[in-house]
């Protein structure tokens, strides 16, 4: 065993540091502040925080009420559904609409369970303590995912209004349900590995897997309720509603509005969730490009990445990431917002974010939290070093709804719709400085029309580089929660 005594901390040296610490007035002030109010409150620069406002030159007026993922890792789904509902709100001419995230959650978990067991079968010949198997057993049933996964759900299973499958105790706090799903998944994985090791043919293995998926469905139905097979749609719509006039009726007994005239209802009964999506969610779930900014010599721009085990639906569209210079990503997001189209974004939301500071709760900026002044140490790192050292990754997905541009046409700040409820942050929204997003952001998903032609060609035809989950790139591309 190696002798580490040569590198040991000398007690006398530490005692000298401790004895001299309080001789410095700044150290005393910092110690008293942090021990009484914690790091964020003590580090905030109130003068800088006051300079950030929720006013934007480019901003969508009709965004709907802020949604709430509660204690679950469904940010990716909420962000995607917030993009999708913009098209529905425009179609129906309404100021608010919300899809059922519980419906999407049910099918996401079911699909994850199924494809996770497919990965177990694929890796059944590897040792149980191999990195691949360990990763599958540890991470297959988590809540996290990506924007394309939500699009896969819409394509295959459809959507329903929130009242058709409302939130439940297990969507508001998913931990207890997830513990049972993880137990069932690991039990099933061990049984499948034993079948393969015993020489069972693939038909027998898949038959066993199908019965395991049925058990997962049973657990989900108990926890979330059964997803509706058909729904009755009755929605008040606006004067400019663009749906089939045959499905519109005047609401009897309702007073006519002076501006919009008689109150009208969209009535469409007995339709499937897929029919609802086809009729009332007028956007193409395949018409998107996922742009990522991962600088570094080992991560060349123009590369299309695929993270192994990241696809959570067998037969769905694979999850891919196109690595681009930040200007490309930024310009695409601005173009989308200028066209009135919200877009998904992802970032490392915990960085320099005083989330529970009451007077400035929704500001993400690089100059509002003076950690270096507080501690008297240099904490600065480049984005490249942070990615290499695993100091940052895109942990949380939200929705860009606005941007403030400077005189040079470049972003100064972003308006971000979150999914933590309207009582969180600033009425449910965050304000991110351009510098902060360039440092701790690095993902947008936009429609193809907003991507430059040369990068669109790479997205369509460049060879895909597969990365393992435990590599630096794989870690940077981990699911958003």
Image (cartoon, helix red, strand yellow):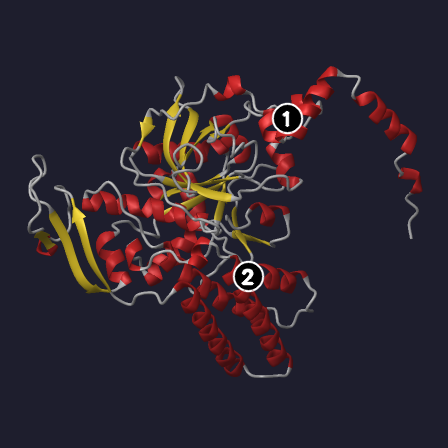
Residue picked out by circle 1: 371
Q: Residues within 10 Å of mark 1 (few under 14, many from 20)?
A: many
Q: Residue at x 8, y 56 (%)?
A: 246
* Relative height, residue 243 to residue 184 (above, below): above
Q: Position of residue 481 (x, y in %)?
A: 50, 49
Q: Nearer the viewer, residue 401 or 375?
A: 375
Q: Nearer the viewer, residue 479 or 37?
A: 37
Image mark count: 2
Q: Residue at x 68, y 30 (%)?
A: 35
Q: Residue at x 80, y 17 (%)?
A: 23
Q: Quadrant of residue 186?
A: bottom right
Is label 1 in a helix, a strand or a loop? helix
Q: Position of residue 202 (x, y in %)?
A: 53, 80
Q: Residue at x 30, y 51 (%)?
A: 284
Q: Residues within 10 Å of mark 2 (few under 14, many from 20)?
A: many
Q: Quadrant of residue 107?
A: bottom left
């Amino acid at each position: 065993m190696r002798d580490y005594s040569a590198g040991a901390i000398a007690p006398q040296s530490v005692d000298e540091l401790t004895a001299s610490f309080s001789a410095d007035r700044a150290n005393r002030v910092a110690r008293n502040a942090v021990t009484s109010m914690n790091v964020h409150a003590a580090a905030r620069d109130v003068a800088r925080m006051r300079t950030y406002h929720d006013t934007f030159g480019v901003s969508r007026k009709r965004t709907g009420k802020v949604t709430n993922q509660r204690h679950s890792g469904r940010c990716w789904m909420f962000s995607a559904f917030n993009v999708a509902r913009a098209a529905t709100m425009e179609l129906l001419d309404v100021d608010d609409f919300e899809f059922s995230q519980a419906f999407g959650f049910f099918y996401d978990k079911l699909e994850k369970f199924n494809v996770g067991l497919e990965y177990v079968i694929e890796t059944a010949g590897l040792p149980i303590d191999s990195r691949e198997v360990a990763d599958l057993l540890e991470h297959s049933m988590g809540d996290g995912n990506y924007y394309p996964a939500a699009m896969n759900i819409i394509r295959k299973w459809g959507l329903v209004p929130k009242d058709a499958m409302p939130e439940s105790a297990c969507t508001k706090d998913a931990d207890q349900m997830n513990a049972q799903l993880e137990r069932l998944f690991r039990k099933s994985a061990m049984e499948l590995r034993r079948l393969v090791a015993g020489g069972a043919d693939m038909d027998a293995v898949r038959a066993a897997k199908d019965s395991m998926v049925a058990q997962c469905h049973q657990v989900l139905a108990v926890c979330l309720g059964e997803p509706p097979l058909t729904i009755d749609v009755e929605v008040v719509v606006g004067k400019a509603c663009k749906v089939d006039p045959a499905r519109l009726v005047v609401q009897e007994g309702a007073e006519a509005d002076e501006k919009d005239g008689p109150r009208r209802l969209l009535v469409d009964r007995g339709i499937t969730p897929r029919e609802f999506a086809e009729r009332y969610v007028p956007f193409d779930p395949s018409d998107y490009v996922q742009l990522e900014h991962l600088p570094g010599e080992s991560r060349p721009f123009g590369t299309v990445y695929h993270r192994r085990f990241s696809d959570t639906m067998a037969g769905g569209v694979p999850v891919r990431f196109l690595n681009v210079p930040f200007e490309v990503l930024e310009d695409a997001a601005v173009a989308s917002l200028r066209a009135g189209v919200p877009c998904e974004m992802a970032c490392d939301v915990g960085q320099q974010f005083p989330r529970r500071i009451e007077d400035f709760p929704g500001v993400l900026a690089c100059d509002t939290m003076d950690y270096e002044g507080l501690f008297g140490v240099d904490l600065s790192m480049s984005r490249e070093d942070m990615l290499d050292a695993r100091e940052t990754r895109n942990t949380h997905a939200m929705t860009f709804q606005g941007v403030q541009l400077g005189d040079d046409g470049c972003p100064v700040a972003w308006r971000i719709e979150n999914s933590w409820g309207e009582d969180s942050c600033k009425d449910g929204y965050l304000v991110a400085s351009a510098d902060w997003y360039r440092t701790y952001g690095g993902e947008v998903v936009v429609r193809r029309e907003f991507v430059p032609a040369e990068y669109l060609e790479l997205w369509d035809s460049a060879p895909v580089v597969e990365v393992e989950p435990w590599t630096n790139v794989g870690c940077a591309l981990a699911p958003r929660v």
